[in-house]
Amino acid sequence: MTEFANTEDVTRSVVILGYAGVQALDVVGPFDVFTSATLCLAAQGKPDTGYAVSLVSVDGAPVSTLTGLEFVAAAPPDPRVPVDTIVIPGGIGADAARADPAVIEWIGTAARRARRVVSVCTGAFLAAQAGLLDGCPATTHWSSARRLSDEFPAVAVDPELIFVRSSQRVWTAAGVTAGIDLALSLVEDDHGTDVAQTVARYLVLYLRRPGGQTQFAAPVWMPRAKRAPIRAVQEAIESEPGGTHSISELAKRAAMSPRHFTRVFTDEVGEAPGAYVERIRTDAARRQLEESDDTVTVIAARCGFGTAETMRRNFVRRLGISPDQYRKTFA
């Protein structure tokens, strides 16, 4: 592995790997963060200390996206030549890209000589295919987390995190805008908080959602059970989050024994009934924190938590921050 000095007086090369079907924002988000940092540093009289960012494709051909945008791309640098940062975006074309031996070979070879490698969204599948995540924690878009875990059992997938340092040199970020959060964090590591804050203000971004926070942007959508009685239970919970919703009551509604109901519900929905109730209550409380001026105590009681302290513990466990912090950030 090539050693890199962690100094601020050099231009750092950032190579973003493109491919057909890449997610446009996975490319543009980190690209704009790094280039904006370069402009900021130049304005501070440090024109040679920013980032030289390039978008490449394995064959040097233009990169098309699902939405119809097409990006001009350069041929990739010789993978034996060290670069500072490699960014592997996600997108609908990630599976086809990781099935291309030339793509995986370039990632694997180049990664060995890079100071750090960053995957965004389903770019984690390419990083895993190249063997960069074995034995490491990792995250990806919430909708693809289970598939990543199933296909790469050696990877400890956490579907909740915005981003995580998977190893000494590899970072993984969740879906789409999480790549921006991670890029800001890397700029902060390289050049300090002041530069990162300036970039965030320029791009009108929130600085910063810490990597330990969860993917708040996940929609309020829950898997629908195939069996009508289980769907009816889901709808009852969702229509009245503050209800009692004990296992015995829910099982009675589904006309099943508590043990059988718990097993069937978990198989159909993907999590146990108690966890599902907690998730629905948390989401209801989140919306009320965003949209109302009611106190945390009132919201906790209305959403079925009972006390503000119970709701606080739940928020910290599930979202990584307290209700008060959540409201300050998202209200």
Image (cartoon, helix red, strand yellow):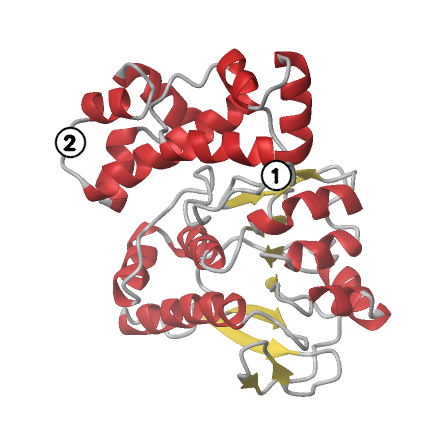
Q: Which mark is residue 225?
A: 1
Residue, x 27% and y 68% (percent of image)? Answer: 44
Q: Are marks 1 and 2 in contact (CB under 8 Å)?
A: no
Judging by the rendered image, the residue that carries numbered circle 2 is 294
**Label 2: element kind:** loop
Give the quadrant of the C terminus.
top left
Q: Position of residue 328 (x, y in %)?
A: 22, 40
Of the numbered discs 1 and 2, the one sitting upstream in the chain is 1
Q: Quadrant of residue 158?
A: top right
Q: Position of residue 8 (x, y in %)?
A: 44, 59
The foreground one among 319 and 54 is 319
Q: Mark number for residue 180?
A: none
Q: Does residue 293 show up?
A: yes
Which image quadrant is residue 310 in? top left
Q: Amino acid at mark 1?
A: Ala
Tell me which corner region of the image, top left, top right, bottom left or bottom right, holds residue 318: top left
Residue drawn 41% across and 66% down? 33
Q: Is residue 319 visible?
A: no
